Amino acid sequence: MPAPAVVLRTFLLIVLAGYTAFAAGPFVWVATMSLRTTTEIAADPYGLPWPLHWEKYADAWFGSNYDTYFWNSTIVTVSAVAALSILGAMAAYCLARYRFPGNRLLFFVIFSTIILPPQITIIGVFELLVDYGLYNTHLGLILVYIAMQMPLTVYILETFFARMPQDLFDAARMDGYSDFEIFWRIALPIGLPAVATTVILNMIYIWNEFLFAVVLLTDDDKRTLPLGIQRFMGDHLDDTGMLATGLMIAVIPIIVAYVFFSEKMIQGMTAGAIK
Amino acid sequence: MAVVRLERITKRFQAAGPPAVDDVSLVIEDGEFMVLLGPSGCGKSTTLRMIAGLETITAGELRIDDRVMNRVPAKDRDIAMVFQSYALYPHMSVQDNLAFGLKRRGVPRDEVRRRVAAAAVMLGLETLLERKPYALSGGQRQRVALGRAIVRDPKVFLFDEPLSNLDAALRVRTRGELIQQHQRLGATMIYVTHDQVEAMTMGTRICVMNHGRVVQVGRPLEVYRDPADTFVAAFIGSPPANLLGAEVAGAGGAVAVRVAGRELTLPRHRAADLEMLESRRVVFAIRPEDIAVAAPAGAADGAGLPARLIAVEPLGAETILVLAPDGLDEEILARVGPEVALRPGDRVALELNLRAAHLFDPTSTRALPRSRRGG
């Protein structure tokens, strides 16, 4: 390898190593703290986790109502992500494949809602849920998450469906399939990388969402994980060790989901980049 | 087996816009291989898609075996189509691609298996049945697309430029395979292409289209030898016919035209047939193979058009000569044998086979009639 190439490669490696440390460092730190007690952390914030306090995970799960929060988060996230994937795919397919008056206007209106920060809509959403008896219910929170994430979902999927060659749909029509069957048996399976992308993005957002959850849920047995983690933060003193353990429990499903969907997600995000 | 009848079919994509297909009438006989030929945007694919049921028909009537099909959905027309991009379902194996249409039609599972196996044998796909389309070559994909149509055993096969994505060698081979399949199946086939070689070699008849209209329908050699207008003369043939401005010179019985100052008597035209001409001007057309090129010393004194050789393009089996006749602004092309001793810049004499020449009305661009028995 010529000398300039070695220099360039070394430089790139240093930059990448620095970026990785910057991105992964806080995560590794929280991971080590999750296995240390708050007293140990107070004595030496950056110390190594030794001895390993695995029992903290059991304490958090059983002693701090984490099983309930985890289950609540699972119900809300799975329901909202499933609804977003199916309804978003249908809406995106319709916008991408059907010519009708106002198609682009509708797409623009749906997508433009993405520019509104959640803080602006939260009072209106709160009033609406109270009016319809959905305040302090999982269904209400699920509907809010669906509304919040639908524009991005439709945008990603519409772009993907619009790129599918028309011949595929014509061939399926000639083969005798109805519009819905073509969507279900052709477009959706082919669009799986894009759907996987929206699944993982929506899952990360909804699993970690705090603002709407804290405003719209009041009962402790309905709370989701981010609210549960907040319980370790007192007015005067934080239980840093348990906070870290709670965070690690919360992040594990996301990591599993990412590992499961990441290959499909990368395919979806780079779709069309290469022919 | 079916007869496809198009009666004054028109297609407009916008109500106020120009028609994409304009008043097309055409009958495709049972078992015929009809080729719709024309340049990009001439309306041939739109016509095919209307037959398929993938586009609505703005006006006119489409019949298959005397049943009006205008409002019959694509799936109920008993038609199969092979697309330019093959349109194989990328998430399904070859076997599933072949069986997909049959399953929807409620064909029993054993029958599906039998038909898929038969088509796979016919097209040499037996070893590829478990593969996904991305693991196939272009030629294999094309065969799967054809197989998907064959297993359906439809009344009519439609082909929308199915060879245009193949390389030249594979295209020639697949062309031959398609001709064989037509002979074997004896089905009615309608084939869209812009490649006149495909049209000439495959079609029982050719329907030449331009600007959404049918310009000429006929057997390939008929269309080649007797082009209906200047567009067909220039579109069919490679290289195309030479079209030159000329003037009717003769009077009485035979017709003579003056081309580049020379008077040429056309043995197959009659003066009476030229009476409808508004002026004495005509378009004189002659195909490159109907021009013989000789060195001036070899030509009889005063005979032939004197010209200068501009370029020599050897193609192996033949040679194309680019020539500039004296007194003409246009260059003309001649097709001669493989061995040519001439060099660019040489003076030559052109001998035109006037029995094969055509005259066209410069206003309407239509061919002027000529006597079959003349000359």
Image (tube, grey):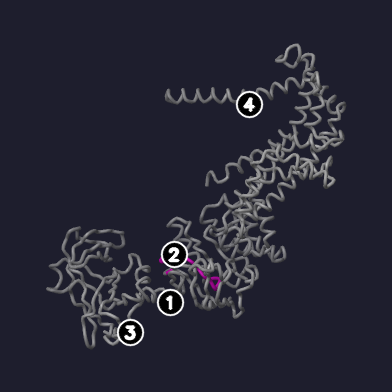
x and y percentages locating residue B102 in the rendered image: 67, 64
Per the image, the residue denoted by label 2 is: B194
Provide the residue designation for mark 4: A23
Which amino acid lies under the numbered mark 1 shown in the image of this protein? Gly
Task: Identify which residue is drawn at 49% across, 75% down.
Answer: B24
Q: Name the residue that disc number 1 marks.
A: B218
Residue B372 is tagged as: 3
> Is A161 above or below relative to B227?
above
Q: Nearer the viewer, mark 4 or mark 2?
A: 4
Front position in the image: A42 or B311: A42
Dot 4 amino acid type: Ala
Q: Are marks 3 and 4 in contact (CB under 8 Å)?
A: no
Q: Secondary structure at mark 2?
A: loop
Up/down of B260 relative to B89, above or below = below
Magenta residue span:
B184-199
| Residue B360, image x, y percentages | 31, 76
